[in-house]
Image (tube, rainbow, N blue to C red):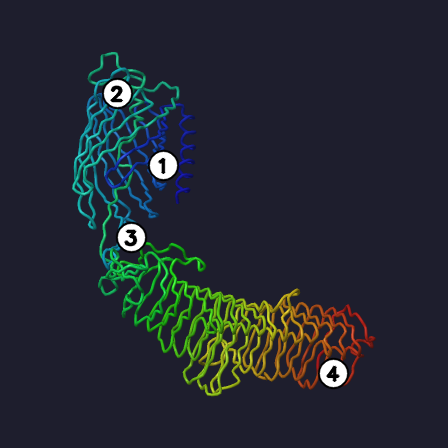
Amino acid sequence: MTRFHCYLVALLSLQVATTAVAQDTWLSRLSVRHSEGDGVGYSDGYTSVDWFLPLLAEQTDSMWFGDFRGIISKDSEFSSNVGTGHRWYNTEQNRIYGANIYWDTRQVDGLNFSQAGIGLETFGEVFDVELNGYTPAVNDSHQQNGGSFQGNNLRVNFETGLSGMDFMVGVNVPAIHNIHGRVLGGAYFFDSHRSPQASGWRVRLETAVHDWMTIIATAQDDNVFGRNATLAVELRRTVEHESNVISNSMRYKFRGESGGGHDDTIRHRLADPVRRQQQIVLTQTSQLATDLTNTPLTFVHVVPGAAGIGTFEDPLGTLTAAIAPDTVVYTPQGGTFVENVTLQDGTQLLSNGPVQVVQSLQGPLILPFSGRSAALTALPATIIGDVTLDNDTTLSGFDVTGTVMATSVTNAVVDTNRVRQPLAMDAVTVTNSTGILLNNLLIDQSGARGIGIDDSSAAVSMVTLSGIAGEGIDINQTGAVDHTNSIQQSSITSVGNALSATTSALSTGDITIAVANTTLGSTAGAGVVVNGTLGGGTTFVSQFTSNTVSAAMMGGVSFRDVTFDAMPGGAIDPLVMTSINVGTLNSRVTGAGVSLVSTVGDVDMGDVDIFNTLGAGLFVDTSPMLTLRSQAGSTVDTTLRAAFNLTDVTTALVFDSMSSVNSNARAASFSAVDGSLAVTTTTAIDASAAPFLYNDIATPFSVGFGNTTINSQQGPLIANNEERTGLFGGLPDAATIYNPVLIIFP
C-alpha cells in the first residue's frame, strides 16, 4: 500500500508538472517539511514532501490546483494527502477565495485508515480565514490495535478515526526585510460515537523567509489530547513559469503603496500551501476482552521461579499451580518448567512462542508478547516432563521432553510443539479418544513409536517425524467404535514402518484412513502398510493423494483387505489418488513397490512412478472387485523381480515405460486379468523365463507393449502355459521389437 501511494503521487506529479510547464503559467511549489512534537490525534514528529501544482489556469485571476503530499512518521509508517481545489481572485475586494477537497490515508501499527476532507479559505491583505472538515471512511474508522494485560484480564485496544472540523482566523503582520508573518487563532472539534469529544483552541505563528523557508509554531489544548505544541520547518522550491498573469502586489496593511517584493504577488498567494490537518485524527480506546457470552476473558500467567498469584503483574511460578478447568494458562516470558503437567477439562496451555489467538466478542485477539518464535527448534518455553491432555484442552508452543498423551479424551489440540522422548516410550500416544488434532509438530526423538493412535480418531497435519526407533505413525483399530484418521502434509522417517494402520482380531468397528501430500521413509520397515485382514469391521481408504515413499526395506505401499471409497457410508465412490511416488532411480525401495491384495473399489492411481528391487513393481492379487487405473506419465522400473504381477483384477493401466532387469523369472505376469494395459516403452532384460506370462485369461485383455526391448533365456511369451513365440513373429531369445505390440486374449 505504501509503495502504491508513493508511485501514484510521483506519476501524477510528473504528469501535472508537465501540463503546468506546457501552459507556461503560474507557479508550482515543491515543499519538504519536518514537524516535531505531539499534535491532535498523533504523537511524535513526521516528515512530509508536498507538490502543489496548477492544473488549469487559463485565466489570469483563477486556477485549479492539485496537491500531493507523502508523509513518513518516525516509525516509518506512511500517510498521504491527495487533493484538488479552486482559487480565484476578486479584484474589487482584493481578496482570494478558495475551496478544496482531499482524500487522506494514514498507517498506524500496520493498520490503514482513510478519510475525506473539504475546505474553504480566503486570503486578504490583512485577514485570512481557513475552514476545514474531515470525515473518516466508515469501513476502517474503528480498528483493533492489539491488547494489553491488566491483572488476569485482557484489555483490547482500538484506534478510532474521528470526524470533525477546525477553523483559523489570521492576521498578516508587517514584513521586515522580506520576512513575512501571520498570527492565527481558532478552534477545533472532533468526535466519534466510540470516543469522547475533543474540542479545544489552537494558535499558530508562521514566519516566512522570502519564499523558500517557513517556520511554523503551533499550540493547542483540548479535553482529550491535552495541551501540546509543535514546531515545523518547511523548505520550498518555487518553479516559476514566465507569463503575463497578474503580478501586482496583494499589499499587506503595513506596506507602502509600492508593495512588497516579488514573492508578494497574487500568483504567489494563489500558490500558498493549503493549511489543514495533515494527519488523520485518531484516538485510542480500550475495553475488557470478553468471550462470546460477554464474560470477561481471564488468563493465569506463569513465569518460572515466580511466587505470585497468577496475575500479569504477579505471576505464578509453576504450570501445575495454574492448571484449573476452563482456564487459559499463559507463559508471557517463556522459560523452562521441570514438572509433569496434567491438564484439566477446558485448559488451554499457551506459550509466547507462536502467535496466540483467542476468540472473543471483539473478534480474534492476538495475545500480547506472543509470536516471539514459532520455529519448532527455537520455541522459548520448555517442559521437561510428560503432558497429559483432557477434554477440550490445548497445548501450544512448548518444547516437551517427555510424552504427550491423551487417554479417553474428547477434543484436544496439540499445535506448534516439539516433542522428544529419549526413553523407550512413544513420543505421542492417543488412546480411546476422538477429535484429536496434532498440527505443526516436530517429533525428532522417540525410543518407540513417534505417534501411536490406538482405537482413536485423530487428524495429523504438518508433522515432521525423525529419529523414531519404532514405527512413525502407528494406527490400531481394536474395538467396536468406528474411527477416522488422516495424515496430511507431513514428513515421516522411522526405523519401523513409516505409516502403519491395522485392525486386531477383536475389532468390530470400521476404520477410515486418509493420507495426502506426505513423504514417508523407513530404514528397516515399509513405507505404508494398511492391513484390514483381522477384525469384523471394514478398513476404508478414503484418500491417498500425492504421497511419496522415499525409502523402505519391506515394500513401498501395501494395501490388504481394504475398501477404497472416497466417501465411506454409502455406495462405493471412485478414489482418485493423483500420484504415487515410490523410490527413485538412484534410491530404490526394497520389496514390492505398490501392493494391493484383497482390495475393493475403483481406483485411479494417477501418475505412478515406481522404482524398486526384490519385489514386484506393481503387485495385485485376489481383487476381483477392484478396478485399477493409471494415467500417462507413469513409470515402473524394477530390478530382480517382475515389473507387473497382476492376478484376479480389472485394469485400465497406462504407463509411459516399464522396465524389468534380472527378474529371475518373468518381467511381467498376468493371470485372470480383465481390461487393458498400455505401455509406450517396454524393457525386459535377462529374464530367466519367458518374460511375459498370460495365464487363465478368460475375458478379453488387451496389452500394448509399444517399443519393446527383450533379452531373455527363453521365448518372449507364454500364454495359457503354452509357448507362443510366434506372436512376436518367431523372434529368437534375444530380440528388439521396434514396432508397437498389441496382444488381445483370449
In percent of width and height, residue 429 lies at 43, 74
Q: Earlier in the sequence, mark 2 or mark 3?
A: 3
For disc 3, the neighbor class at 10 Å (few under 14, some 14 to 19, many from 20) is some
Labelled disc at residue 168 = none
The residue under the point 48% across, 84% down is 504
Marks 2 and 1, how far apart in space? 27 Å
Element type at mark 1: strand
Element type at mark 2: strand
Q: How many marks?
A: 4
Marks 1 and 3, how far apart in space? 25 Å
For disc 4, the neighbor class at 10 Å (few under 14, some 14 to 19, many from 20) is many
Labelled disc at residue 719 = 4
Q: Earlier in the sequence, mark 4 or mark 1?
A: 1
Asked if labels 1 and 4 touch by Cβ distance under 8 angstroms, the answer is: no
Asked if labels 3 and 2 touch by Cβ distance under 8 angstroms, the answer is: no
For disc 1, the neighbor class at 10 Å (few under 14, some 14 to 19, many from 20) is many
Marks 2 and 3, how far apart in space? 45 Å
Q: Which residue is mark 2?
A: 180
Element type at mark 4: strand
Tell me if residue 227 comes above or below residue 333 in the rendering: above
Labelled disc at residue 70 = 1
> What amino acid does circle 2 point to?
His
> What amino acid does circle 3 point to?
Gln
